[in-house]
Image: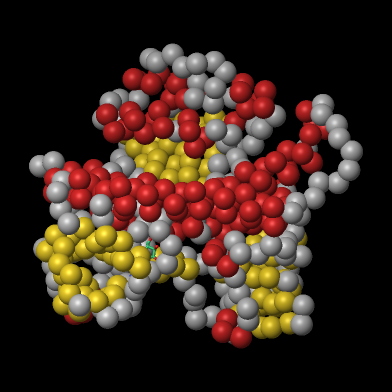
Amino acid sequence: MVRTFDSVIIGSGQAGPFLAARLAAAGQTVALVERKFLGGTCVNTGCTPTKTLVASARVAHMTRDAARFGVHFQGEVKVSLADVKSRADKILLNSRESVGKMLAKAGCTVVHGHARFASAHEILVGDEILRGEQIFIDVGGRTAIPKLPGVENVRYLTNSSLLELSELPKHLVVVGGGAVGVEFAQVFRRFGSEVTLVEMKPSLMHHEDAAASALVAELLQQEGVRLRLDAECLSFSPHPGGVFVHVDCKDGDTDVHGSHVLLAMGRVPNTDDLGLDAAGVIRDSSGYIPVDEQLRTNIPHIWALGDCNRRGGFTHTAYNDFEIVAANLLDGGHRRVSDRIPARATYTDPPLAQVGMTEEEARATGRDLLIATRPMRSVARAIEKGETFGLMKAVVDAQTKRILGAMIFGVGGDEAIHSILEIMYADEPYTTITNAVHIHPTVSELIPTLLGSLRPAT
Ligand SMILES: Cc1cc2nc3c(=O)[nH]c(=O)nc-3n(C[C@H](O)[C@H](O)[C@H](O)COP(=O)(O)OP(=O)(O)OC[C@H]3O[C@@H](n4cnc5c(N)ncnc54)[C@H](O)[C@@H]3O)c2cc1C
């Protein structure tokens, strides 16, 4: 059977459903194909469930720490992973359902199944062909399973299967010190599991500001996460009680024995089983789909949005891809993906937020820089909350006075950093913020003070 639509969208992540609804509202016939759950990674196995876990872990942590605030209770803090999971499931199912409702309300045709190109205008789903004048690929990614020795012989967890557990692992070995790895490491340590975090590089979060990366390691160690950095020669073997992870670190034992092992060594795009060749769409050597400024692939009527185009890697960037495509196609806009300023947060507690360039990236541009840093212990609100761990930093172009980047690793940092991001989008000098009066007591009120203490980089 062949059904014809103005637009066919593959994947219901953070770009596809919103684009489907906009196109339908503009009068198009739209089909959206999803092979698993509406809402994609963020809703089902990414942001939403992990941030609900972060919230539960924080409650456990604060409860253990309550006496520091003069609050006393008797008994032991016990975390029921089944209850934590049921809270997370309720929240994510609600989000998943609202995606379905939005698509239904917009009049889109939702097709469940695996989509594969049969030709440049035809998508095969089961034994049905969906023909589209325009095609939008929003297939996201999945956990990378690197070909490390022995990995095929052990039962490993991914971000998806870890969220299915209803009993706490006795000893969780997290392999991979990026955002996903450090968030899960802290969460499960706070839940009460023993946790070892193994990273092949000499530092955690190595794309982040070097000072922040060192502080993440300090934070996790303070909470009892064991770190095994420089684990250059990783391999795995089964063990009656779980998994041996062999780590060839510069110091410490060469084996870690865990009851469970989580692989968090990056993501790969879901483009290998899409039949892209049948449409003539090019992939790069890592499987990502190259796109132009308007997110078009090399085939003019096919666009690629979200994680699969390697231009973002976050929910907000995938959503912004939808905004760019919708504005250009439907509103006569001229929006470009390169107008987007990088912005991200890692949801350790406290969170690590970064906008624009890190100090290292700014230095690599060769510009004259002004740099300021402030410890979170100089933030009144942080002192009052009893959460003074961390640091804020800003990097400014000495000539133009434009902020090139900023980092806040501290309580409320994920929210407070937006005042800096707005000034960067407005292309205003940093003095716009130093002249502003912020509310007391907030984390944001230290940003003018931070910028007031800028000094030439040495
Ligand atoms: C553990 C974890 C935590 C995260 N936390 C955050 C966070 O806090 N903040 C943040 O900004 N980002 C976070 N992310 C990243 C975020 O989830 C992704 O960047 C975002 O979901 C990307 O959206 P997307 O639209 O590219 O694709 P996805 O959300 O991955 O959706 C793609 C969809 O396409 C479907 N699909 C794939 N191939 C086919 C096919 N051939 N046929 C039919 N359907 C197909 C998939 O089933 C999936 O539903 C996290 C990711 C993980 C793994």
Q: Position of residue 436 (x, y in %)?
A: 40, 15
Would residue 454 appear left or right of 26 to someone viewing this image? right
Would residue 404 appear left or right of 238 to someone viewing this image? left
**Residue 279 at least partly seen:** no
- Is 127 in front, or is 342? 127
Q: Does residue 278 sit above or below 159 in this rendering?
A: below
Task: Name the image quarter holding residue 398.
Answer: top left
Q: Residue at image x 50%, y 16%? A: 439
Q: Position of residue 450 (x, y in %)?
A: 48, 25
Would residue 450 appear left or right of 248 to someone viewing this image? left
Q: Does residue 280 sit above or below 150 in this rendering?
A: above
Label total for image: 0
Work out which residue is located at the far right of the displayed protein and give it: 74
Q: Position of residue 202 (x, y in %)?
A: 57, 62
- Is 187 in front, or is 369? 187
Task: Name the image quarter holding residue 117.
Answer: bottom left
> Where the N terminus falls, by quadrant?
bottom left
- Is 335 in front, or is 447? 335
Q: Quadrant of ligand 1?
A: bottom left
Q: Residue at image x 30%, y 25%? A: 429
Q: Position of residue 343 (x, y in %)?
A: 39, 43
Q: Residue at image x 61%, y 56%? A: 184
**Residue 145 at least partly seen:** yes
Q: Does residue 434 sit above or below 13 in this rendering?
A: above
Q: Residue at image x 66%, y 32%? A: 387
Color style of the picture: secondary structure
Task: Name the image quarter holding residue 394.
Answer: top left
> Where the C terminus falls, by quadrant?
top left
